[in-house]
Image (tube, grey):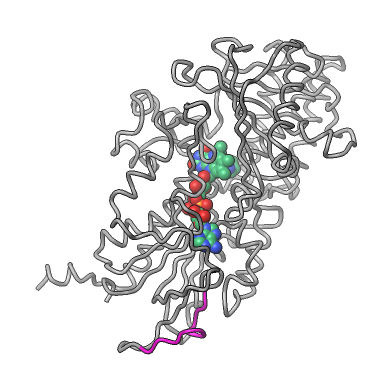
Amino acid sequence: SGVDARVLIIGCGISGIGVAQTLIRHGFRNVRIIEATSRSGGRVKTGRLDGKIIEIGANWIHGPSQENPVFRLASQYQLLDEECMSEENQSVDIGGLLPLFSTWLSSSGKKLEAEVMAPAVEVFMTLLRKCQEFYSSSGAPMSSMGEFLKREALRISNEEWKEDETRKLRQALFSTLMKLECGVNGTHTMDDVELGTFGMYKSLPGLDCTFPGGYDGLIKHMMNELPKDIVLFNKPVKCVHWNNIHSQSSSKEGTCPVTVECINGETFEADHVIVTIPLGYMKKHHDTLLNPPLPQHKLHSIQRLGFGTNNKIFLEFEQPFWDEECEVIFLVWEDEYDFQNPVSDMKTAWIRKMSCFTVLKPTERYGYILCGWIAGYESEYMETLPEEEVLHTMTHLLRRFTGNPTIAPKKLVRSQWFHDPYTCGSYSYVAKGCSGQDIDNLAEPLPLTGSEAKPLQVLFAGEATHKSFFSTVHGALLTGWREANRLISHYNPLPRKVTANL
Ligand code: 6YU
């Protein structure tokens, strides 16, 4: 019965923890998590900068309101501040777009006026909403978001604004907003994002909020509810042998259908394995991760779906150079008005991909810390540079854009998600040519239904397997619950219920 089934969960991120939590609540006694690293949380990763809490991975609760399971858990564990919990905050519905107090700095060291910049932001937001609508309407006029956004932004600009310096600056701001959108989507270029399915991602009501004590408080509380030794740390899994190919055991109940082989040679037998490994890792290791290998359609979906890089560069300052109410500082390169980035090499040009800095608030908690956002190949390149070089480049960038030659950040901490061997990027997106079917394929358990073999040997959870909340913590958590419930209903009726009914 279910309570005795041997269940192995691969990966101790929020989705893996979610699986364990649900199974254990339903009486499963034989549940283990195998984790490659020495910590739980995966892409929920809280760090420190000079003693202050910073988020290396997930930042916000996207859409903190009752429908969001991360919000519900965080409220239950009392991890949120009053403002975030307020009815008012929960009911704000802006479709995932943040109304931030912005500052715009240009590459010639000028602060650009809100009256000049705001109309461009308006147009861009309207275009993003249009992109979302293609999913529910009759389809998209072209295949990539990038093509659509560039074409429409330039068309509106040419039609509505007279040809002068202001128009050029607004167009240059479009370039910046495209870079930011690359970060939001976790892609190198918006040309790689499918236009027709952009609206498949659903935003929940509620004004995005953070965890005052760090996102990993959520992980700690969830882990506390699990049995003490449930996680085996520092055990990267090399291969999942299913359909009993590798099993040597011949216990009373017969052989185990799945054997998990770790890189260190250890093996673990199970009735069910739930893979929560990030899509980035699966893309890189799909040929060795499963034996027998993945069915073709599943493999193709893994290869087709997108998984890019978005990194953060935190900078700490003695004194702020921004206004008190400022929440985000955009960098506008004046020569990028026609979306044709000047050709130059990565070594000198990577910094151009930085779209903006968000200001960590409140000041009493953080002091003066900015978080710079950079996505794509430039972000992956940045990861390879020595920290001093990044700090040096950032200092020059800020001096240039503020026109203030004395600006000097004192400390830097950055994320390096692409070179994290067990993540290989930041999060998934629906790449050009993909549809919801690819996400369904990814989530489909093995062996495929209709086969004679023992069912539900390998199940798949994780952020990239959620059709409407991919790329988020709540999406990941829901997929963990989904796969746990798949197993629970497989063993239905539950032993406890049976007893109760007698
Ligand atoms: C969110 C946010 N946020 C910023 C950055 C990142 C992410 N996300 P895990 O990876 O956690 O766990 C897998 C485990 O498996 C892990 O521990 C591995 O070590 C282990 N493993 C791997 N290989 C193994 C092996 N071989 N053997 C054993 N173990 C192995 N989400 O809600 N709010 O602000 C952000 C952000 C820099 C990197 C984020 C955010 C994404 C979440 O962090 C992520 O989805 C979940 O934590 C994943 O959990 P998991 O369990 O699946 O995997 C319109 C539109 C478009 C769509 N996008 C809009 C939304 C924007 C997305 N926003 C993200 C933004 C930020 C800033």
At a point 45% along the width and 30% down the height, the residue shown is: 209
At a point 38% along the width and 36% down the height, the residue shown is: 65
Left or right of 176? Residue 327 is left
Q: Is residue 497 above or below residue 88?
A: below
**Nearest to the observer: residue 466 or residue 3:** 3
Q: Which residues are magenta?
A: 240-250
Left or right of 112? Residue 411 is left
At a point 20% along the width and 71% down the height, the residue shown is: 495
Q: Is residue 260 above or below residue 280?
A: below
Q: Could one spot residue 35 in this view of the protein?
A: yes
Left or right of 187? Residue 203 is left
Q: Position of residue 342 (x, y in %)?
A: 89, 33
Q: Position of residue 130 (x, y in %)?
A: 65, 37
Left or right of 333? Residue 87 is left
Q: Is residue 139 above or below residue 184?
A: below
**Nearest to the observer: residue 465 or residue 348:** 348
**Looking at the figure, which quarter contains the C terminus?**
bottom left
Q: Position of residue 224 (x, y in %)?
A: 30, 48
**Nearest to the observer: residue 221 or residue 462:** 221
Q: Position of residue 100 (x, y in %)?
A: 56, 21
Residue 104 counted in the magenta span: no
Q: Could one spot residue 277 in this view of the protein?
A: no
**Looking at the figure, which quarter contains the N terminus?**
bottom left
At a point 44% along the width and 87% down the height, the residue shown is: 248
